Image (spheres, rainbow, N blue to C red):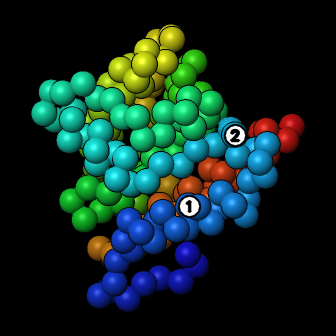
Amino acid sequence: PNQLQSKDMYLSDTCIDFYTRYLTETQLSEKKEAGVFITSPLFYTHLNSMYINNAPVKSSWYLESISEARCLIVPIHDHLHYSVVAIINPWTAPAMYHYDPMQTYHSTEDIAQCLSAYLNNEENLLQNSPPIMHKLHGPLQENGYDCGVYVLKFVSYVISVVVKQIES
């Protein structure tokens, strides 16, 4: 995602899924892949719909894969905008990092509450204290249509950092 899109074009969830799978296949070996899991943007949409309707926030979509992850990356698509959360050590001492290329478009607090509810409810996998959400301040998009490109660049960066940590 090095070139900016034209104003008439937006990245779709399918494009986001395709590129995150591409990153997984090209930047992660089988050993390293076990430490990183990237969800579809539909995953958060599904969780959030349960959360706002006061239903138990659970999902069996990825349970087997997610339960072993050391880093869980959750792209978020809501109200025609993308942001992303990286959750480090999601099942032991979780720390969440939210990057929004428009800085304040998505509510970091609302996202933290929804994802915390998921981590707490999913088969009681979360053993320790509730996650702490950190709002990241990174490059900001200068228009209304490049958020997906910024999110994919962030995902690529997180994968490279996690790979370096796994290797050392």
Which residue: 20% across, 41% down? 49
For residue 144, above or below residue 159: below
Label 1 belongs to which residue? 20
Direction from residue 4 to residue 105 in the image, left or right: left
Amino acid type indicated by mark 1: Thr
Residue 58 appears in the rendering: yes
For residue 32, above or below residue 125: below
Among all residues in the image, which is located at the extreme left?
A: 53
Disc 2 is placed on an element classified as loop
Amino acid type indicated by mark 2: Ala
Disc 1 is placed on an element classified as helix
Q: Quadrant of residue 148?
A: bottom left
Residue 162 x %, y %: 70, 43
Residue 149 x %, y %: 47, 70
Q: Which label is found at residue 34?
A: 2
Direction from residue 16 to residue 54 in the image, left or right: left
- Quarter of the image with the N terminus is bottom right
Direction from residue 9 to residue 19 in the image, left or right: right
Residue 26 x %, y %: 73, 64
Distance between the alpha carbons at the discs numbered 1 and 2: 15 Å
Residue 112 appears in the rendering: no
Q: Residues within 10 Å of mark 1 (few under 14, many from 20)?
A: many
Q: Residues within 10 Å of mark 2 (few under 14, many from 20)?
A: some
Which residue: 15% across, 27% down? 54
Among all residues in the image, which is located at the extreme top?
A: 128
